[in-house]
Image (spheres, rainbow, N blue to C red):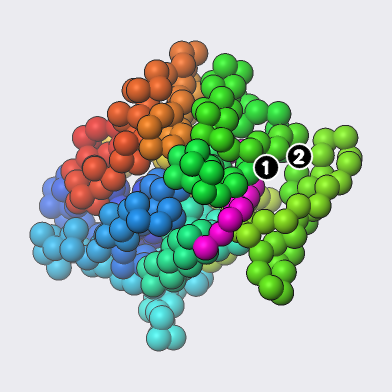
Amino acid sequence: MSKTVVILGAGMTGLPLTHYILDHYASRHDLKVILISRSDEFYWNIASPRAVIPNQLDDDKVLYSIPETFSRHPVERFEFVVGVAETWYPDRSSVAVVFENGGKRVVQYDTIIVATGSDCNDNMPWKMVGSPKETRAVLSKVRTDMFKAHSIVVAGGGPTGVELAGELGYEYATTGKKKVTLVMADAQPLDTRLMPSTRLAARKELEKLNVNIISDTKLSRSAANEKGGYTLELTHHNGVKETMHTDILLPTWGIRYNTSFAPPSLLEPNSRLRVNGTLRSPNYDNVFVVGDAANLDSYAARVREAQVRHLASALEKYFPGEDVPEYVAEDKVTMTVAVGRGRGVGQLGNFGLWTLLVWWFKGRHMCTNIVPEYVRGKTLILGAF
């Protein structure tokens, strides 16, 4: 009798892992893979800072049908289930799934891979917003609001905030069409683990695009106005408060992990699932956790990809019952950040990346050129399996 592998989540960890297991292990080890996802479309959120800009990226460049990508696999090897994991029973090796129409199904498994990821706060489209329909609606609303606006505030100086401010600066601020402001809590944008020169380079690129940067400042309060727009309260590092008005507020910070279905005993205080060195739950050898849901590493795309690569290889040992190798987290800081459609900044280890290299790799298309092959399991962001 075949064994069942359940994969929860069809994002940037669950989708490529499903393809890899089907292509390399399913027939050899007599497996049936059940992919459970709340969405029947895959969202290429890497391009979201550009996708919200009117007339830049159509929805079909960032949203792809999941069932179509698995059409080559026979039903005895693969099943796709659209639903939300409601309750997980690891002691019984089962998970209860709720469908959109209110129906339920309990799915039994021999092995489960939890890759449920995370969502952005405030329903911002930097990640999938509920269903594909809801995501498309949010993208459309942001574009419409942006088209009408005269002033836009981006809150948060992380990679998403920098890329979004860069897109807005390139499209609007350089020509004086709209005022674009980036509010960030640190003195410089991007992660503090990056070299000061990399962070400074990002700031300079934004300033070239006429983006107004308010640093060392937190957005302490925001309120929507009855006649449109927002009133913001900014708190500077010295405690001084300032009131600011804007037509659009686009927060880029804060995420919530999609782990509410898990038993509290498996969760860390930050709501991520506890994992050991083999990317498995310390309590259950048949439970793997990868991506944002795992309490390991950061939740950058490059980290997710490293975990996918490791687990794809480690399952070669797991399925025949051999010892599973441990995952070694990458300690080299790597990041590429597009700043507008013409430039970018990046770092590989202790070396800064040339602007044109970042533009070629990411900025010119936000990696949308590889998505058709990616969703079919034929490549990863940094190359083929």
For residue 115, say whether it is visible.
no
> Is 224 one of the magenta-colored residues?
no
Estimate the x, y position of residue 276 in percent, counting from the top left: 51, 39
What numbered label is drawn on residue 106? none
Give yes or no for contact between labels 2 and 1 (Cβ–Cβ under 8 Å): yes
| Badge 1 element | strand
> Is 157 one of the magenta-colored residues?
yes
Quadrant in the rendering for residue 10: bottom left
For this orientation, the residue located farthest to the right is 239
State left or right for residue 185 relative to residue 320: right
* Amino acid marked by disc 2: Thr
- The span picked out in magenta is 148-158
Q: Which residue is mark 1?
A: 183
For the residue carrying disc 1, how many other residues have a C-alpha within 10 Å: few (<14), some (14-19), or many (20+)?
Answer: many
Q: Which residue is mark 2?
A: 217
Residue at 42% in and 74% down? 97
In the rendered image of this protein, does residue 36 appear above or below residue 171?
Answer: below
Estimate the x, y position of residue 107 in percent, counting from the top left: 36, 71
* Amino acid marked by disc 1: Val
Residue at 44% in and 45% down? 171
Viewport quadrant of the N terminus:
bottom left
In the rendered image of this protein, does residue 381 appear above or below residue 252?
Answer: above
In the rendered image of this protein, does residue 225 appear above or below residue 30?
Answer: below
| Badge 2 element | strand
State left or right for residue 71 relative to residue 128: left
For the residue carrying disc 2, how many other residues have a C-alpha within 10 Å: few (<14), some (14-19), or many (20+)?
Answer: many
Residue at 51% in and 59% down? 146
Q: CA distance from mark 2 to mark 1?
A: 7 Å
State left or right for residue 104 relative to residue 238: left
Q: Nearer the viewer, residue 38 or 22?
A: 38
